[in-house]
């Protein structure tokens, strides 16, 4: 049984459960506080994350940082993880088998971080967390005592700027959650 973040990190670093580990430079585990109020869940590491081992450290990370600042969440009150810990080649979406291979780590992280609010960044995070796509845009659902909401993935906001006001409005409406 994994009892500490260090033990979890060791297990992830030595994992060979799916093919993604073969091309990964670094496993990308988490960023943020170990006892967060808000947990953001992204999709998968990209090129910058693979090179550094740090989630959301590239362009999408800058958008996420701005979003966190805008939400007025203090340092240590948030954390971010991904559905898989290794970069899928060419930044493709993680496959079902890869999500399944990483599932125990994903669940353990959520369990250990035990946030009050979970923010699913896009469809892959929603599918990994809920098993399928269920949330309506703007919906907040209580699951196991946690408030779960879905945001657009920061990368989607880069490519479709017209979604930004919609997301901004949702953030303003729900600010009492975090
Ligand atoms: N996109 C993600 O979903 N996760 C990262 O860590 C970086 C970009």
Image (cartoon, rainbow, N blue to C red):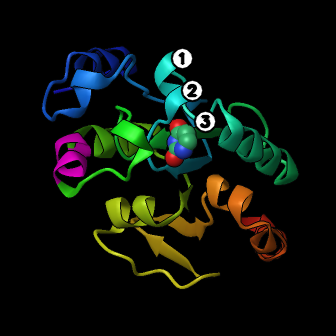
The residue that mark 1 highlights is: 52
Q: Check the picture and name the quadrant holding the N terminus.
A: top left
Q: Position of residue 18 (x, y in %)?
A: 15, 35
Q: Position of residue 115 (x, y in %)?
A: 53, 48
Q: Is residue 77 visible?
A: no
Residue 48 circle label: 2
Report the residue at 54% width, 31% height from top: 55
Q: Check the picture and name the quadrant holding the C terminus.
A: bottom right
Report the residue at 65% width, 81% height from top: 138
Q: Is residue 89 above or below residue 12?
A: below
Does the residue at mark 1 contact the one at mark 2 (Cβ under 8 Å)?
A: yes
- Residue 150 sits in quarter: bottom right
Reply yes or no: does residue 90 show up in magenta. no
The extreme bottom residue here reads: 136
29 on left or right of 38? left
Could you say whether the residue bearing mark 3 is in a helix, strand or loop?
loop
Q: What is the spatial separation of the Cα atoms under label 1 and label 2, in whole angstroms?
A: 6 Å
Could you say whether the residue bearing mark 2 is in a helix, strand or loop?
helix
The residue that mark 3 highlights is: 56
- Residue 109 sits in quarter: top left
């Amino acid at each position: 049984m994994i009892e500490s973040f260090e033990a979890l990190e060791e297990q992830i670093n030595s994992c060979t459960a799916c093919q993604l580990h073969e091309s990964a430079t670094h496993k990308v585990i988490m960023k943020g506080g170990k006892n967060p109020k808000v947990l953001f869940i992204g999709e998968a590491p990209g090129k910058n994350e693979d090179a550094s081992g740090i989630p959301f450290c590239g362009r999408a990370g800058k958008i996420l940082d701005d979003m966190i600042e805008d939400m007025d969440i203090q340092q240590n009150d948030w954390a971010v993880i991904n559905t898989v810990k290794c970069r899928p080649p060419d930044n493709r979406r993680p496959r079902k088998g890869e999500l399944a291979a990483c599932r125990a780590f994903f669940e353990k992280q959520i369990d250990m971080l035990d946030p009050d609010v979970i923010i699913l960044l896009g469809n892959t995070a929603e599918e990994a967390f809920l098993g399928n796509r269920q949330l309506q845009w703007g919906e907040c659902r209580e699951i196991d005592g946690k408030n779960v909401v879905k945001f657009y993935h920061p990368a989607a906001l880069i490519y479709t700027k017209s979604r930004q006001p919609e997301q901004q409005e949702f953030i303003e409406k729900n600010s009492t959650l975090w």
